Image: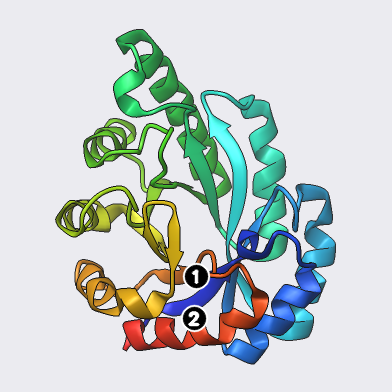
Amino acid sequence: MGYDLGLVSITFRDKTPREILTAMKEAGLKVIEWGSDVHCPPERADEIAKLQGEFGIECCSYGTYFRLGVTDLKELPRYIAAAKILGTDILRLWCGDKDSENYTEEEKQELFRQCKLAAELAEKENVTLCMECHNYTYTNTLQGAKELMMAINSEHFRMYWQPNQFKNFEENLDYAKTISPYTKHIHVFKWRGQKKLSLYEGITEWKAFLECFKGEQSLLLEFMPDNKIETLKIEAKALKEIAK
């Protein structure tokens, strides 16, 4: 097994899907996670799927901005349908709209109820809903993510993993080790607080992170140190070095 290497489209929100796929092709990246906010709202799925075929790049996940516990569950089927058109059975969602420690017990139970309903729909549709490790959601901490995974307890309700730029290496490594059995994809970047750095500055720590995983996930570049699409070739080379 080896990691599939790719890109999160929201890295370049100001670029068109064609511009992004062109840059990916030149950088030797094979898979993409389309964002539903700009590049691929559900109604554009057919158009984007054809464009993928033109460039020979596959969609590994659909990066929705669906928030469990916030967005009406009646909206979820249209995102699932779009994901299938794009050729993926994995959708990225956010769990809630605040940090786990800020939920009351009553709010948590309602959020988990919504998650279980979503997981049941995902099982019925044979897709997997993945929660992003994100601040201001229930998975902001390892404890929150682990509690969520154990409470929902479904093969169709899983996680992404990414380092938290506000935590130290050891904390991020612990999170990676613990959540790896539940992890479908990994967002790759090198930040220090709000400062974006080149991935070349994080090769050693990223190699350590990847020792926690089995090589079955996609490694998806997210954000450039200078926000320029021309930098993708350089960052892709760093990603390939990490994945060796």
For badge 1, the amino acid type reads Leu
- The answer to whether residue 1 is visible is no
Please give the residue where the numbered disc 2 appears in the rendered image. Answer: 235
Pick the residue in front: 46 or 98.
98
Asked if residue 166 is positioned above or below residue 162 in the image, the reply reads above
Q: CA distance from mark 1 to mark 2?
A: 8 Å
Of the numbered discs 1 and 2, the one sitting upstream in the chain is 1
Q: On the picture, is 136 further left or further right than 29?
A: left
Pick the residue in front: 154 or 112.
112
Kindly identify the residue that appears in the image at 58 percent across and 80 percent down: 232
Please give the residue where the numbered disc 1 appears in the rendered image. Answer: 221
Kindly identify the residue that appears in the image at 42 percent across and 33 percent down: 137
For badge 2, the amino acid type reads Glu
Q: Quadrant of residue 229?
A: bottom right
Q: Which image quarter holds the C terminus?
A: bottom left
Q: Are marks 1 and 2 in contact (CB under 8 Å)?
A: yes
SS for tag 2?
helix
Q: Which image quarter holds the N terminus?
A: bottom left
Q: On the picture, is 240 further left or further right than 44?
A: left
- The answer to whether residue 30 is visible is yes
Pick the residue in front: 156 or 31.
31
For mark 2, does the 10 Å Cα neighbourhood hold few (<14), some (14 to 19), or many (20 or more) residues?
many
Whole-percent x and y of residue 5?
Answer: 48, 79
Tell me, for residue 148, which label it has, or none.
Answer: none
Asked if residue 38 is positioned above or below residue 24 in the image, the reply reads above
